[in-house]
Amino acid sequence: MWTRRTEHEIEAAKLADEAKRKSLVRPLYWALPISIVVSILYSFGYRGGATRGVILYSDPIPFLSTKFYFGAIFSFSLLYVVVYLQQRRGSKFVGDDILLCGNCQEPAHANPQRICSCGGRLEPFEYYTWDED
């Protein structure tokens, strides 16, 4: 059975979500490992994806060279900005438009009015907890 959380719990969840979206550390968890992998692949000569069935390779560049550092810093900066902007915008995945009706307790897709077919108000699942009977 779905039970609505208290207003205090809902506000705490909203504040936690907002803090998560404004975090400067969370993009590091994605940007740093991906940029390291990209830099290593670039230094070994990998220069691009499969184009017409051919993988592009070039002469490898040595580690600890200026070109390697420039590529690593550039890829990290680009990935960090992209991941940070995506995080600030919020996740827009497939299930994000599914809400729960306050009256009939049935999930429904979001509509502009956020009104269920039964007449109840549609709210996010974060406003509710599932309690076993």
Image (tube, rainbow, N blue to C red):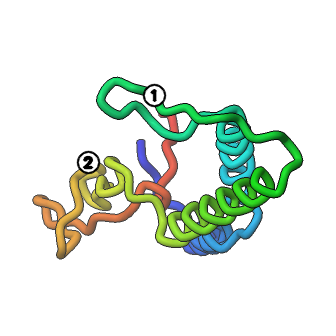
In the displayed image of the protein, which residue is found farthest to the left? 117
Residue type for callout 1? Ile
Question: To which residue does mark 1 refer?
Answer: 55
Query: Which amino acid type corresponds to the residue marked 2 in the rendered image?
Result: Glu
Res 117 quadrant in image = bottom left
Q: Could you say whether the residue bearing mark 2 is in a helix, strand or loop?
A: loop
Mark sitting earlier along the chain (2/1): 1
Image: 27 above or below 65: below
Closer to the eye: label 2 or 1 = 1
**What is the number of callouts on the image?**
2
In 3D space, how far apart are the residues under numbered discs 2 and 1 (Cα atoms)?
50 Å
Q: Position of residue 50 (x, y in %)?
A: 40, 31
Determine crowd level at label 2: few under 14, some 14-19, many 20+ residues with C-alpha closer than 10 A. Answer: few
Q: Position of residue 26 (x, y in %)?
A: 71, 59
> Element at badge 1?
strand
Above or below, 56 against 38 in this view is: above
Closer-to-camera residue (122/5): 122
Residue labelled with disc 2: 106
Decide which of 102, 54 is in the foreground and name it.
54
Q: Pointers 2 and 1 in contact (CB under 8 A)?
A: no
The structure residue drawn at horizontal position 55% and vertical position 64%, both measured from the top left corner, is: 82
Name the foreground residue: 63 vs 85.
Answer: 63
